[in-house]
Amino acid sequence: MKDSILVINCGSSSLKFAILANAGQQTLVEGIADRLGSTESSISFKFEGTKTEIALSDGSHKSAVNQIKEWLSTQPQIEASLAGIGHRVVHGGETFSESVLINKAVIDGIKDCARFAPLHNPAHTKGIEVAFELFPGLPQAAVFDTAFHQTLDKEQFLYPIPMSLYREHHFRKYGFHGTSYRYISKHLAEIYKESINEGVLVAHLGNGASVCAINNGKASDTSMGITPLEGLMMGTRSGSLDPSLLSFISEAENISPEEALSILNKKSGLLGVSEISNDCRTLEEAMTSGDSKAKLALDMFASRTAKHLVSAATTLDSIDHLVFTGGIGENSSYIRSTICKYLKAFNIEIDNTLNDTAPRGEVFEISANGHKTKVWIIPTNEELMIALDTINLIQDKP
Ligand code: AMP
Protein backbone atom coordinates (compact mmCIF):
# COMPACT_ATOMS: atom_id res chain seq x y z
CA MET A 1 0.00 0.00 0.00
CA LYS A 2 1.29 3.48 -0.88
CA ASP A 3 1.24 5.28 2.45
CA SER A 4 4.88 6.22 3.17
CA ILE A 5 6.02 9.82 3.14
CA LEU A 6 9.55 11.09 2.68
CA VAL A 7 9.92 14.08 5.01
CA ILE A 8 12.66 16.52 4.06
CA ASN A 9 14.03 19.40 6.14
CA CYS A 10 16.50 21.14 3.89
CA GLY A 11 18.88 23.70 5.41
CA SER A 12 21.67 25.69 3.78
CA SER A 13 24.37 23.18 4.77
CA SER A 14 22.35 20.18 5.92
CA LEU A 15 19.43 18.03 4.83
CA LYS A 16 17.53 15.98 7.39
CA PHE A 17 15.17 13.31 6.16
CA ALA A 18 12.92 10.50 7.37
CA ILE A 19 10.52 8.08 5.75
CA LEU A 20 7.37 7.60 7.83
CA ALA A 21 4.95 4.76 7.13
CA ASN A 22 1.58 3.66 8.44
CA ALA A 23 -0.06 7.11 8.72
CA GLY A 24 3.18 8.48 10.13
CA GLN A 25 3.22 6.01 13.04
CA GLN A 26 6.42 4.20 12.01
CA THR A 27 9.79 5.70 11.07
CA LEU A 28 11.33 3.32 8.53
CA VAL A 29 14.58 5.15 7.94
CA GLU A 30 16.02 8.52 8.93
CA GLY A 31 19.24 10.38 8.41
CA ILE A 32 21.08 13.57 7.76
CA ALA A 33 23.34 14.96 5.06
CA ASP A 34 25.85 17.27 6.74
CA ARG A 35 28.40 19.88 5.70
CA LEU A 36 26.73 20.37 2.32
CA GLY A 37 28.64 22.79 0.15
CA SER A 38 32.00 21.52 1.44
CA THR A 39 34.30 18.74 0.27
CA GLU A 40 33.72 16.82 3.53
CA SER A 41 29.99 16.31 3.16
CA SER A 42 28.39 12.96 3.86
CA ILE A 43 24.97 11.44 4.37
CA SER A 44 23.99 8.98 7.09
CA PHE A 45 21.14 6.45 7.10
CA LYS A 46 19.72 4.95 10.29
CA PHE A 47 17.84 1.82 9.27
CA GLU A 48 16.82 -1.18 11.40
CA GLY A 49 19.15 -0.08 14.23
CA THR A 50 22.22 0.29 12.02
CA LYS A 51 23.82 3.55 10.98
CA THR A 52 25.70 3.81 7.68
CA GLU A 53 27.53 6.83 6.36
CA ILE A 54 28.28 7.60 2.71
CA ALA A 55 30.54 10.39 1.45
CA LEU A 56 28.86 12.73 -1.02
CA SER A 57 30.64 13.14 -4.34
CA ASP A 58 30.18 16.89 -4.83
CA GLY A 59 28.61 18.07 -1.57
CA SER A 60 25.49 19.36 -3.32
CA HIS A 61 21.87 19.10 -2.11
CA LYS A 62 21.17 17.18 -5.33
CA SER A 63 23.78 14.53 -4.53
CA ALA A 64 22.19 14.10 -1.06
CA VAL A 65 18.71 13.53 -2.52
CA ASN A 66 20.27 11.29 -5.16
CA GLN A 67 21.78 9.12 -2.40
CA ILE A 68 18.32 8.80 -0.80
CA LYS A 69 16.98 7.71 -4.21
CA GLU A 70 19.82 5.19 -4.60
CA TRP A 71 19.26 3.87 -1.08
CA LEU A 72 15.56 3.44 -1.93
CA SER A 73 16.46 1.37 -5.00
CA THR A 74 18.06 -1.14 -2.60
CA GLN A 75 14.78 -1.29 -0.62
CA PRO A 76 12.16 -1.91 -3.34
CA GLN A 77 9.31 -2.44 -0.83
CA ILE A 78 9.85 0.95 0.79
CA GLU A 79 10.38 2.57 -2.60
CA ALA A 80 7.07 1.12 -3.84
CA SER A 81 5.25 2.37 -0.73
CA LEU A 82 6.24 6.05 -1.22
CA ALA A 83 3.15 8.20 -1.75
CA GLY A 84 4.67 11.66 -1.55
CA ILE A 85 7.24 14.04 -0.15
CA GLY A 86 6.66 16.58 2.63
CA HIS A 87 8.98 19.57 3.02
CA ARG A 88 9.46 21.67 6.14
CA VAL A 89 9.48 25.34 5.14
CA VAL A 90 10.49 27.95 7.73
CA HIS A 91 8.78 31.08 6.37
CA GLY A 92 5.41 31.24 4.64
CA GLY A 93 4.85 34.95 5.27
CA GLU A 94 1.21 36.06 4.98
CA THR A 95 0.83 33.96 1.83
CA PHE A 96 0.55 30.54 3.47
CA SER A 97 -1.79 29.95 6.41
CA GLU A 98 -1.81 26.17 5.95
CA SER A 99 0.13 23.35 4.30
CA VAL A 100 -0.20 23.13 0.52
CA LEU A 101 0.62 20.81 -2.36
CA ILE A 102 3.56 22.32 -4.22
CA ASN A 103 3.27 23.73 -7.73
CA LYS A 104 5.14 26.49 -9.54
CA ALA A 105 3.09 29.25 -7.83
CA VAL A 106 3.90 27.78 -4.39
CA ILE A 107 7.63 27.68 -5.19
CA ASP A 108 7.43 31.33 -6.27
CA GLY A 109 5.58 32.16 -3.03
CA ILE A 110 8.28 30.48 -0.93
CA LYS A 111 10.97 32.35 -2.89
CA ASP A 112 9.08 35.60 -2.24
CA CYS A 113 9.17 34.99 1.54
CA ALA A 114 12.97 34.46 1.37
CA ARG A 115 13.62 38.12 2.26
CA PHE A 116 12.49 37.27 5.83
CA ALA A 117 14.38 33.94 5.96
CA PRO A 118 17.38 34.45 3.67
CA LEU A 119 19.24 31.37 4.92
CA HIS A 120 16.32 28.95 5.11
CA ASN A 121 13.84 29.58 2.27
CA PRO A 122 16.38 29.43 -0.60
CA ALA A 123 17.61 26.10 0.80
CA HIS A 124 14.01 24.82 0.95
CA THR A 125 13.29 25.75 -2.67
CA LYS A 126 16.54 24.07 -3.69
CA GLY A 127 15.44 20.89 -1.88
CA ILE A 128 11.98 21.05 -3.48
CA GLU A 129 13.33 21.58 -7.01
CA VAL A 130 15.86 18.75 -6.63
CA ALA A 131 13.16 16.42 -5.25
CA PHE A 132 10.87 17.19 -8.23
CA GLU A 133 13.74 16.44 -10.59
CA LEU A 134 14.69 13.12 -8.95
CA PHE A 135 11.19 11.92 -7.97
CA PRO A 136 9.14 13.29 -10.89
CA GLY A 137 6.01 11.23 -10.24
CA LEU A 138 5.57 12.01 -6.54
CA PRO A 139 3.31 14.79 -5.20
CA GLN A 140 5.05 17.14 -2.79
CA ALA A 141 3.70 19.28 0.04
CA ALA A 142 5.08 22.30 1.88
CA VAL A 143 4.47 22.62 5.64
CA PHE A 144 5.22 26.06 7.08
CA ASP A 145 6.64 26.92 10.54
CA THR A 146 4.74 30.22 10.42
CA ALA A 147 1.32 28.93 9.29
CA PHE A 148 -0.14 28.02 12.72
CA HIS A 149 0.32 31.61 13.93
CA GLN A 150 -1.73 33.16 11.11
CA THR A 151 -4.75 33.12 13.47
CA LEU A 152 -3.20 35.83 15.71
CA ASP A 153 -5.26 39.04 16.03
CA LYS A 154 -3.86 42.28 14.64
CA GLU A 155 -3.31 43.56 18.19
CA GLN A 156 -0.82 40.70 18.66
CA PHE A 157 0.94 40.45 15.31
CA LEU A 158 1.43 44.14 14.47
CA TYR A 159 4.50 46.03 15.63
CA PRO A 160 3.77 49.55 16.93
CA ILE A 161 5.64 51.17 14.03
CA PRO A 162 4.33 53.33 11.16
CA MET A 163 1.60 51.24 9.53
CA SER A 164 2.94 52.05 6.07
CA LEU A 165 5.83 49.68 6.93
CA TYR A 166 3.34 46.88 7.45
CA ARG A 167 1.22 47.78 4.43
CA GLU A 168 4.13 48.18 2.03
CA HIS A 169 6.65 45.64 3.36
CA HIS A 170 4.63 43.16 5.49
CA PHE A 171 6.82 43.89 8.55
CA ARG A 172 4.94 42.10 11.36
CA LYS A 173 5.27 39.27 13.83
CA TYR A 174 5.06 35.87 12.10
CA GLY A 175 6.17 33.40 14.77
CA PHE A 176 7.85 30.01 14.23
CA HIS A 177 7.80 26.42 15.61
CA GLY A 178 4.17 26.39 14.36
CA THR A 179 4.30 22.76 13.23
CA SER A 180 5.45 21.74 16.71
CA TYR A 181 2.67 23.79 18.38
CA ARG A 182 0.06 22.28 16.06
CA TYR A 183 1.29 18.80 16.98
CA ILE A 184 1.18 19.61 20.72
CA SER A 185 -2.33 21.08 20.49
CA LYS A 186 -3.57 18.03 18.56
CA HIS A 187 -1.82 15.52 20.81
CA LEU A 188 -2.99 17.20 24.03
CA ALA A 189 -6.56 17.04 22.69
CA GLU A 190 -6.07 13.28 22.12
CA ILE A 191 -5.03 12.69 25.75
CA TYR A 192 -7.19 15.44 27.31
CA LYS A 193 -10.24 16.04 25.13
CA GLU A 194 -11.53 19.26 26.74
CA SER A 195 -8.22 21.04 26.04
CA ILE A 196 -9.46 21.91 22.54
CA ASN A 197 -11.95 24.32 24.21
CA GLU A 198 -9.48 25.60 26.81
CA GLY A 199 -6.43 27.84 27.20
CA VAL A 200 -3.06 26.20 26.55
CA LEU A 201 0.43 27.65 27.00
CA VAL A 202 3.28 25.81 25.27
CA ALA A 203 7.01 26.36 25.82
CA HIS A 204 9.00 24.89 22.92
CA LEU A 205 12.48 25.01 24.45
CA GLY A 206 15.35 23.77 22.32
CA ASN A 207 18.40 25.45 20.84
CA GLY A 208 15.77 27.72 19.28
CA ALA A 209 13.08 28.54 21.84
CA SER A 210 9.67 30.17 21.83
CA VAL A 211 6.31 30.10 23.59
CA CYS A 212 2.81 30.00 22.17
CA ALA A 213 -0.64 30.64 23.61
CA ILE A 214 -3.42 28.50 22.13
CA ASN A 215 -7.01 29.52 22.85
CA ASN A 216 -9.73 27.04 21.87
CA GLY A 217 -7.31 25.22 19.54
CA LYS A 218 -6.09 28.36 17.75
CA ALA A 219 -2.81 30.24 18.23
CA SER A 220 -3.54 33.57 19.95
CA ASP A 221 0.03 34.77 20.63
CA THR A 222 3.63 33.66 20.22
CA SER A 223 7.01 35.05 21.21
CA MET A 224 9.09 34.90 18.01
CA GLY A 225 8.67 37.74 15.54
CA ILE A 226 9.42 38.61 11.93
CA THR A 227 12.48 36.37 12.45
CA PRO A 228 13.22 33.80 15.19
CA LEU A 229 15.40 36.34 17.05
CA GLU A 230 12.53 37.90 19.02
CA GLY A 231 11.25 36.59 22.34
CA LEU A 232 13.02 34.12 24.60
CA MET A 233 16.72 33.91 25.33
CA MET A 234 17.95 30.90 23.31
CA GLY A 235 21.08 28.80 22.72
CA THR A 236 22.92 31.53 20.82
CA ARG A 237 20.18 34.15 20.27
CA SER A 238 19.64 37.03 22.67
CA GLY A 239 15.87 37.14 22.24
CA SER A 240 14.07 40.46 22.83
CA LEU A 241 16.06 43.47 23.95
CA ASP A 242 16.17 47.21 23.43
CA PRO A 243 16.72 47.64 19.64
CA SER A 244 19.00 50.61 20.37
CA LEU A 245 21.63 48.07 21.44
CA LEU A 246 22.20 47.26 17.78
CA SER A 247 23.63 50.70 17.02
CA PHE A 248 25.46 50.87 20.39
CA ILE A 249 27.20 47.53 19.69
CA SER A 250 28.12 48.42 16.11
CA GLU A 251 29.51 51.82 17.17
CA ALA A 252 31.38 50.53 20.25
CA GLU A 253 32.90 47.55 18.42
CA ASN A 254 33.38 49.40 15.12
CA ILE A 255 31.39 46.81 13.17
CA SER A 256 28.48 47.02 10.72
CA PRO A 257 24.84 46.70 11.92
CA GLU A 258 24.75 43.30 10.14
CA GLU A 259 27.76 42.11 12.16
CA ALA A 260 26.14 43.43 15.36
CA LEU A 261 22.97 41.53 14.44
CA SER A 262 25.04 38.41 13.89
CA ILE A 263 26.34 38.75 17.49
CA LEU A 264 22.73 38.80 18.72
CA ASN A 265 21.89 35.73 16.61
CA LYS A 266 25.00 33.61 16.96
CA LYS A 267 27.04 34.64 20.00
CA SER A 268 24.45 35.61 22.60
CA GLY A 269 21.89 33.66 24.66
CA LEU A 270 23.13 30.77 26.81
CA LEU A 271 26.49 30.88 25.01
CA GLY A 272 27.00 34.62 25.46
CA VAL A 273 26.11 34.71 29.16
CA SER A 274 27.81 31.47 30.24
CA GLU A 275 30.89 32.00 28.04
CA ILE A 276 30.97 28.18 27.98
CA SER A 277 28.39 26.70 25.62
CA ASN A 278 24.99 27.09 23.97
CA ASP A 279 24.09 23.59 25.10
CA CYS A 280 21.79 23.26 28.11
CA ARG A 281 23.11 19.83 29.12
CA THR A 282 26.72 21.05 29.10
CA LEU A 283 25.71 24.06 31.21
CA GLU A 284 23.84 21.90 33.72
CA GLU A 285 26.98 19.80 34.14
CA ALA A 286 29.06 22.97 34.63
CA MET A 287 26.53 24.33 37.14
CA THR A 288 26.67 21.07 39.10
CA SER A 289 30.46 21.48 39.23
CA GLY A 290 29.96 24.95 40.74
CA ASP A 291 30.24 27.22 37.70
CA SER A 292 28.29 30.38 38.59
CA LYS A 293 28.16 31.74 35.01
CA ALA A 294 26.51 28.53 33.80
CA LYS A 295 23.91 28.85 36.58
CA LEU A 296 23.31 32.53 35.75
CA ALA A 297 22.75 31.68 32.06
CA LEU A 298 20.28 28.88 32.88
CA ASP A 299 18.40 31.02 35.43
CA MET A 300 18.16 33.94 32.98
CA PHE A 301 16.85 31.51 30.36
CA ALA A 302 14.17 30.26 32.78
CA SER A 303 13.23 33.75 34.01
CA ARG A 304 12.77 35.10 30.50
CA THR A 305 10.76 32.07 29.45
CA ALA A 306 8.40 32.62 32.41
CA LYS A 307 7.95 36.30 31.49
CA HIS A 308 7.06 35.45 27.89
CA LEU A 309 4.65 32.75 29.02
CA VAL A 310 2.82 35.25 31.21
CA SER A 311 2.79 37.81 28.42
CA ALA A 312 1.34 35.30 25.91
CA ALA A 313 -1.23 34.20 28.52
CA THR A 314 -2.90 37.63 28.31
CA THR A 315 -4.56 36.34 25.10
CA LEU A 316 -6.12 33.30 26.85
CA ASP A 317 -9.51 33.06 28.55
CA SER A 318 -7.89 30.90 31.24
CA ILE A 319 -4.58 29.08 31.75
CA ASP A 320 -5.73 25.47 31.83
CA HIS A 321 -2.57 23.76 30.56
CA LEU A 322 1.16 24.47 30.39
CA VAL A 323 3.13 22.14 28.12
CA PHE A 324 6.92 21.77 27.99
CA THR A 325 8.45 20.44 24.77
CA GLY A 326 11.69 20.60 22.71
CA GLY A 327 15.08 19.19 23.76
CA ILE A 328 15.30 21.36 26.90
CA GLY A 329 11.59 21.38 27.75
CA GLU A 330 11.38 17.60 27.49
CA ASN A 331 14.62 16.79 29.31
CA SER A 332 15.67 19.49 31.75
CA SER A 333 13.92 19.16 35.12
CA TYR A 334 16.02 22.11 36.39
CA ILE A 335 14.74 24.49 33.71
CA ARG A 336 11.14 23.30 34.13
CA SER A 337 11.19 23.75 37.90
CA THR A 338 12.93 27.15 37.72
CA ILE A 339 10.38 28.43 35.18
CA CYS A 340 7.52 27.23 37.37
CA LYS A 341 9.04 28.93 40.45
CA TYR A 342 8.64 32.22 38.56
CA LEU A 343 4.99 31.35 37.82
CA LYS A 344 3.83 30.85 41.42
CA ALA A 345 1.86 34.13 41.41
CA PHE A 346 -0.17 32.64 38.54
CA ASN A 347 -1.03 29.61 40.65
CA ILE A 348 1.07 27.30 38.46
CA GLU A 349 2.99 24.70 40.43
CA ILE A 350 4.60 21.38 39.69
CA ASP A 351 5.23 18.29 41.81
CA ASN A 352 9.01 18.22 42.21
CA THR A 353 9.21 14.46 42.54
CA LEU A 354 7.19 13.92 39.36
CA ASN A 355 9.29 16.57 37.60
CA ASP A 356 12.57 14.92 38.65
CA THR A 357 11.49 11.38 37.78
CA ALA A 358 9.67 12.08 34.50
CA PRO A 359 10.43 9.27 32.01
CA ARG A 360 12.31 10.38 28.87
CA GLY A 361 10.43 10.58 25.59
CA GLU A 362 6.96 10.09 27.04
CA VAL A 363 3.89 12.22 27.71
CA PHE A 364 3.90 12.91 31.45
CA GLU A 365 1.90 15.16 33.75
CA ILE A 366 3.90 16.94 36.46
CA SER A 367 1.27 19.27 37.99
CA ALA A 368 1.13 19.63 41.77
CA ASN A 369 -2.11 18.50 43.39
CA GLY A 370 -4.82 21.11 43.80
CA HIS A 371 -3.65 23.53 41.11
CA LYS A 372 -5.95 24.41 38.26
CA THR A 373 -3.30 24.57 35.54
CA LYS A 374 -2.23 21.13 34.38
CA VAL A 375 1.48 21.00 33.60
CA TRP A 376 2.66 18.47 31.00
CA ILE A 377 5.78 17.23 29.27
CA ILE A 378 4.88 16.26 25.70
CA PRO A 379 7.63 15.22 23.26
CA THR A 380 7.07 17.07 20.00
CA ASN A 381 6.93 15.36 16.60
CA GLU A 382 7.15 17.77 13.69
CA GLU A 383 7.99 15.01 11.18
CA LEU A 384 4.72 13.26 12.00
CA MET A 385 2.74 16.48 11.39
CA ILE A 386 4.52 16.98 8.04
CA ALA A 387 3.79 13.38 7.00
CA LEU A 388 0.12 13.61 8.04
CA ASP A 389 -0.39 16.94 6.22
CA THR A 390 1.21 15.46 3.09
CA ILE A 391 -1.00 12.35 3.22
CA ASN A 392 -4.15 14.45 3.75
CA LEU A 393 -3.31 16.80 0.90
CA ILE A 394 -2.60 13.92 -1.46
CA GLN A 395 -5.91 12.22 -0.51
CA ASP A 396 -7.87 15.46 -0.98
CA LYS A 397 -6.30 16.02 -4.39
CA PRO A 398 -9.08 16.38 -6.99
P1 AMP B 1 16.54 20.79 20.30
O1 AMP B 1 17.00 22.04 19.62
O2 AMP B 1 15.06 20.72 20.51
O3 AMP B 1 17.11 19.54 19.68
O4 AMP B 1 17.17 20.83 21.78
C1 AMP B 1 18.54 20.92 22.00
C2 AMP B 1 18.78 21.33 23.46
O5 AMP B 1 18.22 20.35 24.34
C3 AMP B 1 20.26 21.46 23.82
O6 AMP B 1 20.49 22.65 24.55
C4 AMP B 1 20.48 20.25 24.70
O7 AMP B 1 21.51 20.43 25.65
C5 AMP B 1 19.14 20.13 25.39
N1 AMP B 1 19.00 18.79 26.00
C6 AMP B 1 18.88 17.60 25.37
N2 AMP B 1 18.88 16.60 26.31
C7 AMP B 1 19.00 17.18 27.52
C8 AMP B 1 19.07 16.70 28.87
N3 AMP B 1 19.02 15.40 29.14
N4 AMP B 1 19.21 17.60 29.88
C9 AMP B 1 19.25 18.91 29.61
N5 AMP B 1 19.19 19.44 28.38
C10 AMP B 1 19.07 18.60 27.33
Image (tube, rainbow, N blue to C red):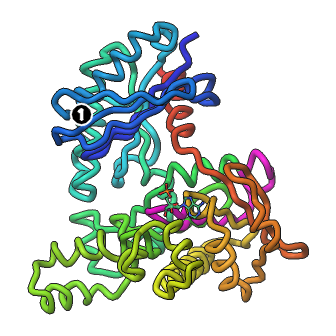
Residue type, label 1: His
Nearer to the camera, 216 or 6: 6
Instruction: From this view, report whether residue 172 is shown above or below residue 311.
Output: above
Instruction: From this view, report whether residue 99 is shown above or below residue 362.
Output: above
Residue 274 screen position, x and y as percent: 42, 80
Residue 311 visible at all? no
Q: Which residue is mark 1?
A: 61
Please check the rendered image and state whether residue 201 is part of the magenta-colored stretch, yes or no.
yes
Which quarter of the figure has residue 125? top left
Residue 144 visible at all? yes
Please check the rendered image and state whether residue 72 is part of the magenta-colored stretch, yes or no.
no
Nearer to the camera, 4 or 311: 4
In the drawing, does residue 91 fall left or right of residue 234? left
Residue 272 screen position, x and y as percent: 35, 79
Q: Quadrant of the N terminus?
A: top right
Residue at x 34%, y 77% (from the top left corner): 268
